[in-house]
Image (tube, rainbow, N blue to C red):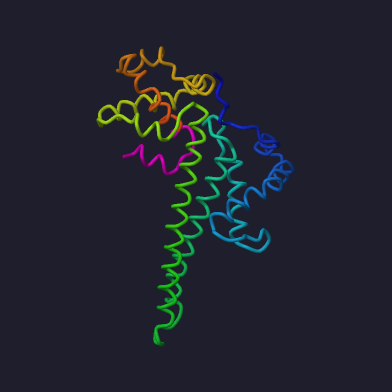
Amino acid sequence: MKIRAPVKEIPLLDQARAGDAAARNDLIFRYRPFVMKIVSRMMGRYIHPSSDDEASIGLIAFNEAIDSFRPDKGVSFLTFAQTVIRRRLIDFIRSEMRRRQEVPLAGSLEDDGGDENDLALARQAVENYHIASEAVERRDEIERFGRVLEQYGLSIRELARLSPRHENARRRAMEVARIVAENAGYREFLSQRGELPLKDLEKEVRLSRKTLERQRKYIIALVIIMMEDFFYLRDYLKA
């Protein structure tokens, strides 16, 4: 079984990355609706492409993604671009929070306390938005993870059942997954066949073939998290 490669062909991307300014401008123009959809969804409101700061931030982030995209990482360009856009918007929100915190320093505090009340409300509003947007991001990431797992015949529900109970077993599986994710040949084998290169791994790791086969699906899921740009799921790998 051949698994669909994570990296997708994007027209004009190669030319843009090679320095073709016309191709870059055309690429950004073509994918502006894609950028606006991400920004509007994250901000929770319609974003006007020509007047809202968030629109400019999204387009600048998309342009940044063109330059910083790494095809060898095994993640699609649009998935990578979406992550960059979201992170830049979060940076913008945090910047706005810091700016609002500094506002009272430029004015007088010898009034009826209205500025302080407004500042408190602004802080709470930004904080509430940050919490809500992060929850949406986590949900979207889990849904995207589920779709990628399906390409390998796996499911999130199945992983919950297959996850090793003992910490040592989980740690060893993590080590194997990292070896696969960092080896271009192993990544290609997994992408093309949907399976781990067990024969080669058995020679490289301190696990038996039987153990590798038993943890196969769990290890594949870990490799996917490492290969794709799953910002929140990677926190799980650090735990």
Q: Between residues 111 and 198, which one lies in front from this camera angle?
A: 198
Which quadrant is the N terminus positioned in? Answer: top right
Q: Is residue 175 left or right of residue 12?
A: left
Work out whether residue 166 or residue 122 is closer to the camera in this orientation and state it: 166
127 horizontally vs 83: left or right: left
User: In which image quadrant can residue 175 be found?
Assistant: top left
- Quarter of image, res 123: bottom left
**In the rendered structure, which segment of residues is drawn in magenta?**
225-239
Residue located 58% across and 61% down the image:
45
Left or right of 27 in this view: 231: left
At horizontal 66% and vertical 37% (from top left) the residue drawn is 13
Q: Is residue 22 above or below residue 57?
A: above
Q: Main secondary structure of the magenta part?
A: helix
Residue, far bottom:
111
- The image shows residue 129 at horizontal and vertical percentages of 46, 61
Position of the C terminus, as image quadrant, is: top left
Numbered marks: total: 0
At a point 35% along the width and 23% down the height, the residue shown is 215
Residue 164 position, x and y percent, is 30, 29
Residue 118 shown in magenta: no
**Percent position (x, y) of residue 89?**
52, 55
Identified at 50% across, 50% down, the residue is: 87
Residue 4, percent from left and from top: 58, 26
